[in-house]
Image (cartoon, rainbow, N blue to C red):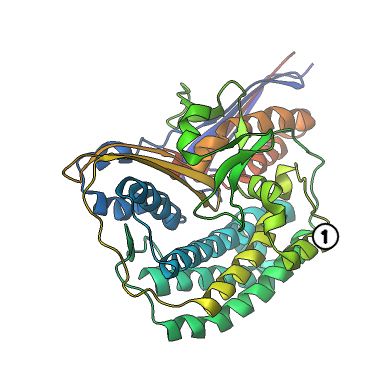
Amino acid sequence: MTRPRTVTVDLLARVEGEGGIHIRMEGREVAEARVRIFEPPRLFEAFLRGRHFMEVPDIVARICGICPVAYQMSSIHALEAILGVTVHPGVRALRRLLYCAEWIESHALHVYMLHAPDFLEYPDAIAMARDHPGVVAQGLELKKTGNDLMTLIGGREIHPVSACVGGFYKVPETAALRAFAARLRRARAIAVDTALWARALQFPDFDQDHEMVALRHPDEYPLNEGRVVSSRALDIAVDEYEDHFVERHAAWSNALHSSVRSRGAYVVGPLARYNLNFDRLGPVVRDLARECGALPPLTNPFKGIVVRALELVWACDEALSIIAAWEPPPEPRVRCAPRAGAGRACTEAPRGILFHYYALDDAELVTAARIVPPTAQNLRSMEEDLTRIAPRYATAPLDELARRCEQAVRNYDPCISCATHALTVTVERRPA
């Protein structure tokens, strides 16, 4: 008989936001597993009401300091759908390039600073750097490359200010973009090394049968456009999103929990995106995936670190391709004629699809807003993973059990501030 025991980890480091994990075990079984989000509600949807639509991208960028571009792009596309705006191909390409910059900085941060310490059994990247200084230095260089590219295009690396409805307030000089290509080639070489390094990590045997959801574009690896598809035959236009996905309040969380209507939990993010769009990655990255032993379908959340490394390579390749072909638009942005209506958009944030809905009145003011971030969409699947990983360590020391549960959550690179900043982990053990 296992006596009742409780373990508390005051701070789950290496995630963004404030929340907690609570697990109650009865013998070797999990009776309850909850990811508690106790960060206070952010209220962005409420205080967007009454704002002029041109203010929206700069406001929603403040939801997250790691993925502000995702919030800007989803809002811009939704608002342009209302206003009937079609942008110049040069603007579309530059938006895609700005998104690549965010993927590079975000994936590098997660792979090296947040997730690698779990696999190498260090408490944090600072401790890891003492034994693996070269690894950490590579991660920092990759992240700085992404940050600096965001600055070049967006005006600054955190909450960039150049993107707007209709295009950009200002576009970078072509010569400056061309000159940056040398740094991207260096970053690409590091990203390839990252993928080859990540493949050698030790992964627990933990394949899961989650429904995976992502955007799919007819020609490209998805960023700003595409249909919403899933591993269980869902294939819908973004305008149909609310017909198929539902959010519900959970008493233990300030973040809403998403589900596929009538089906339940699902997963968004790199693993889903990769499995559903592998053929869009291009032959070079697909060959590297084979070399890494990472051909789809990949259903082990712990292997998300390999997928993020492969997406790093793709993002560098895509950025280099865009820079080589880019021609600036005749004007940075097109003017938007006033129009009342409603619009929806979904883009691929580093952590998965990010849905935005807005309604405008005749005065160009927002009357309604809805934002569904990736972490909120993954919460139910995180809890399901906890119910399956915890029994494997039912008789292990409490600190080992807690560490494995933390890692299971970090597989998803949760951005808790987006969903509603370290997690408190509480495990109760009771006799069966």
Residue at (62, 72) in percent of width and height: 137
* Viewport quadrant of the C terminus: top right
Q: Position of residue 171 (x, y in %)?
A: 36, 74
Q: How packed is label 1: few (under 14 Cα within 10 Å), some, or many (20 or more)?
A: few
Residue at (77, 45) in percent of width and height: 297
Taking 306 as reference, is 396 above or below it? above
Horizontally, residue 431 falls left or right of residue 409, namely: right
As rendered, which of 292 and 138 lies closer to the eye? 292
Task: State the residue lying farthest toward the left.
Answer: 363
Quarter of the image holding residue 3?
top right
Horizontally, residue 322 falls left or right of residue 362, namely: right
* Viewport quadrant of the N terminus: top right
Q: Position of residue 374 (x, y in %)?
A: 52, 42
As rendered, which of 329 and 359 lies closer to the eye? 329
What secondary structure is found at the residue carrying circle 1? helix
**Which three-letter amino acid code belongs to the residue tagged 1?**
Arg
As rendered, which of 222 and 30 lies closer to the eye? 222
Residue at (65, 73) in percent of width and height: 188
Residue at (46, 55) in percent of width and height: 67
Horizontally, residue 53 falls left or right of residue 98, namely: left
Residue assigned mark 1: 290
Taking 23 as reference, is 372 above or below it? below
Q: Is residue 206 visible?
A: yes
Task: State the residue lying farthest toward the top.
Answer: 432
Taking 428 as reference, is 159 above or below it? below
How many numbered circles does the render carry? 1
Q: Is residue 9 visible?
A: no
Q: Position of residue 255 (x, y in %)?
A: 45, 32
